Image: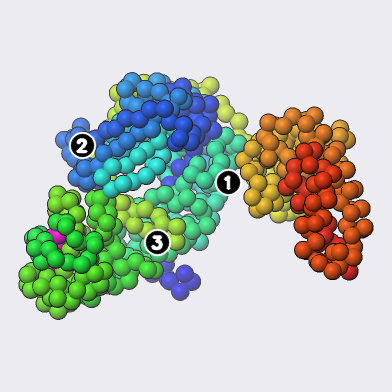
């Protein structure tokens, strides 16, 4: 990354942050914003989505390609979803709670407000919205964050959650559809991968400072718009973790640089894309390749592309991978190309016959795809268009972020034709009352306060915790480091040990801290209490104290036992566990959880061995 001169490349980066808001209801109905397990779905229905022209009579190019993929969309319905999500009923008025949170965030970013909030429809027909569009509303514009301009802040509805993609149909869950989001977009003022990561981190910190956003994987995601000189604007969707954002930018720069090099080489070769799709099914009627056998097989000819389709343009991704991405979006498994053949059960004789059939020379590349005839035809036609763009440079497109920092093709970059007014939702005047919101303390400022009570690193972690108010409530009643241990350190340790810490909500943590405050348990007993709750989330205080009392007896019993059996432990080391476990269980079976006994006995044996 340090070897790339981003200034000379003219790198421009803009970030879009999409953050779910922690509201009681969804944006346009009164359904809760809770997530559900798919198994809880009590009903499902399916749709096919069609493309409509905009008010100006234009068709959006991204939506047009989605329609050509001819997919069926299946939606999982729940008892916490309604007819608004199913698009069987008009939306309600926009959620004022979500609007006030958006206003609060906009003020923290020094933004200007619109006079009236008007809801727009943004065409999205990949199935992620039952309506075929996403509702979005501009709230504020022209802000600033450390010298990076904030272009827009919108409040919009979250899309469906994708469950599985089977090629010709996609299954979505409606539980997430309609959860309020804020979408914050910067101007393309960012000039390096490092700066992109820093800006995204600062935006995320500001959002969490409100205390009114959802936490956890999938509740926040970044889209990144990237371009270089002589390249093109590419939008990368769905960067889930901040850790790879700088790598995403770096790898996209590398991809565009390599595509420009391929363009120059193709020009030298006077390359040409033949605008014809060849049916080569007969050539593979006796093939041993399982991928091609008994399927329609078609081919396209790229003159002068020989050796370049297999050229790496991102780590472990080649130009051929770009073509394969397109085929996959049309429901196919991928493509084969002559730079990599013979392989995959395709013989040298079949490759020779293929080249002869399409009249390909050694300097040319042939691409083949197999599957349903119509899908193959449409996929190869789109690959022809993409191959032609190799002669021009870098196409404007929307890509998906992969976990390793590389990206995959999703669809063409959408244009202005995808937006039109929402006629079912009335506009909202931004009155003085709506704009009168309190600006919260930033996490970084809160952390500085906590540094008087906690070590610096721990102070920031607690300041950034969703339970920071619980810390403030108990920090003057109990030693602050003990409160921080209950809220953060112990749950983090239990997660590593495999405990289900999702059940440790604010009420459970408060109960534990109250038990310490009242002297019902020692501060050292907090870990045991949280373990008990993890194993039995419905346990009340009396039950927990009962178990803790018995566990204390177990501690004494085990310590006396290892002292008595010192010779056995010295002789058998850790293998002494089994006979000693039998003796402890004989005393406490049915009174104390066997897992707790095993943990304590193993620890006592280990300490005895170390003490020799």
| Mark 2 / mark 3, whichever is N-terminal | 2
Q: Determine the CA span between mark 3 and mark 1.
A: 26 Å
For the residue pair 392 and 85, the one nearer the viewer reads as 85
- Residue for point 9% across, 60% down: 279
**What colouring style does the render use?**
rainbow
Relative to 212, does residue 397 appear above or below in the rendering? below
List x then y, in percent, for residue 136: 37, 33
Can residue 291 be spotted in the picture?
Answer: yes
Q: Determine the CA span between mark 1 and mark 2.
A: 39 Å
Q: Is residue 548 left or right of residue 210?
A: right
- Callout 1 crowding tier (Cα within 10 Å): few <14, some 14–19, many ≥20: some
- Residue for point 53% across, 26% down: 24
For the residue pair 48 and 443, the one nearer the viewer reads as 48
Pointers 1 and 2 in contact (C-beta within 8 Å): no
- Residue for point 40% across, 23% down: 82
Relative to 391, does residue 220 appear above or below in the rendering? above
Q: Is residue 299 magenta-colored?
A: yes
Quadrant of res 282: bottom left
Q: Which residue is denoted by mark 1 in the rendering? A: 205
Q: Which of label 1 and label 2 is nearer to you?
A: 2
Pointers 3 and 1 in contact (C-beta within 8 Å): no
Highlighted range, magenta? 297-302
List x then y, in percent, for residue 276: 8, 60
Q: Secondary structure at mark 1?
A: helix
Q: Which residue is denoted by mark 2 in the rendering? A: 51
For the residue pair 525 and 258, the one nearer the viewer reads as 525
- Image quadrant in which the C terminus is located: bottom right
Q: Which of label 3 and label 1 is nearer to you?
A: 3
Q: Which residue is denoted by mark 3 in the rendering? A: 406
């Amino acid at each position: 990354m340090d070897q790339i001169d981003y200034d000379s490349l003219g790198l421009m980066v803009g970030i879009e942050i999409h953050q779910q808001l922690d509201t009681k209801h969804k944006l346009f109905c009164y359904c809760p914003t809770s997530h559900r397990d798919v198994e809880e779905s009590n009903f499902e229905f399916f749709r096919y989505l069609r493309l409509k022209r905009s008010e100006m009579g234009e068709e959006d190019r991204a939506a047009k390609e989605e329609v050509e993929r001819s997919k069926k969309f299946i939606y999982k319905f729940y008892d916490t979803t309604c007819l608004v999500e199913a698009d069987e009923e008009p939306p309600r008025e926009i959620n004022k709670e979500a609007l006030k949170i958006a206003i609060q965030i906009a003020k923290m970013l020094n933004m200007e407000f619109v006079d009236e909030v008007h809801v727009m429809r943004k065409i999205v027909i990949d199935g992620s919205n039952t309506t075929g569009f996403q509702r979005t509303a501009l709230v504020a514009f022209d802000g600033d964050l450390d010298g990076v301009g904030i272009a827009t802040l919108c409040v919009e509805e979250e899309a469906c959650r994708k469950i599985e993609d089977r090629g010709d149909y996609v299954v979505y869950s409606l539980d997430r559809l309609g959860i309020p989001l804020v979408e914050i977009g910067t101007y393309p003022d960012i000039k390096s991968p490092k700066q992109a990561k820093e800006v995204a981190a600062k935006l995320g910190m500001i959002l969490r400072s409100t205390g009114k956003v959802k936490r956890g994987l999938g509740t926040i995601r970044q889209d990144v718009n990237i371009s270089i000189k002589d390249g093109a604007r590419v939008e990368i969707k769905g960067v889930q973790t901040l850790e790879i954002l700088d790598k995403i930018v770096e790898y996209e720069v590398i991809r565009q640089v390599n595509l420009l090099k391929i363009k120059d080489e193709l020009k030298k070769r006077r390359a040409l894309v033949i605008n014809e799709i060849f049916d080569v099914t007969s050539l593979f009627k006796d093939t041993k390749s399982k991928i091609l056998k008994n399927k329609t097989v078609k081919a396209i000819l790229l003159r002068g592309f020989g050796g370049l389709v297999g050229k790496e343009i991102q780590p472990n991704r080649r130009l051929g991978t770009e073509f394969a991405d397109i085929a996959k979006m049309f429901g196919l498994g991928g493509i084969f190309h002559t730079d990599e053949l013979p392989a995959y059960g395709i013989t040298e004789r079949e490759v020779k016959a293929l080249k002869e059939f399409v009249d390909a020379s050694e300097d040319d590349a042939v691409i083949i795809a197999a599957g349903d005839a119509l899908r193959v035809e449409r996929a190869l036609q789109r690959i022809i268009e993409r191959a032609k763009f190799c002669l021009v440079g870098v196409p404007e497109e929307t890509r998906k972020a992969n976990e390793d920092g590389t990206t995959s093709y999703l669809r063409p970059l959408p244009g202005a034709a995808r937006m039109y007014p929402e006629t079912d939702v009335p506009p909202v005047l931004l009155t003085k009352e709506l704009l009168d919101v309190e600006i919260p303390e930033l996490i970084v400022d809160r952390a500085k306060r906590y540094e008087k009570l906690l070590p610096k690193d721990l102070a920031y972690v607690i300041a950034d915790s969703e339970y920071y108010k619980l810390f403030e409530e108990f920090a003057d009643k109990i030693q602050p480091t003990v409160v921080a241990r209950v809220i953060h350190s112990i749950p983090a340790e239990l997660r590593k040990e495999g405990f289900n810490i999702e059940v440790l909500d604010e009420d459970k943590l408060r109960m534990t801290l109250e038990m310490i405050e009242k002297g019902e348990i020692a501060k050292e007993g907090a870990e045991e209490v949280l373990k008990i709750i993890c194993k039995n989330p419905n346990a009340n205080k009396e039950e927990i104290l009962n178990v803790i009392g018995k566990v204390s007896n177990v501690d004494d019993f085990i310590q006396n036992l290892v002292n008595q059996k010192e010779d056995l432990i010295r002789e058998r080391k850790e293998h002494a566990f089994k006979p000693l476990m039998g003796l402890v269980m004989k005393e406490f079976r049915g009174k104390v959880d066997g897992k707790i006994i095993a943990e304590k006995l193993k620890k006592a044996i280990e300490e005895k061995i170390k003490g020799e």
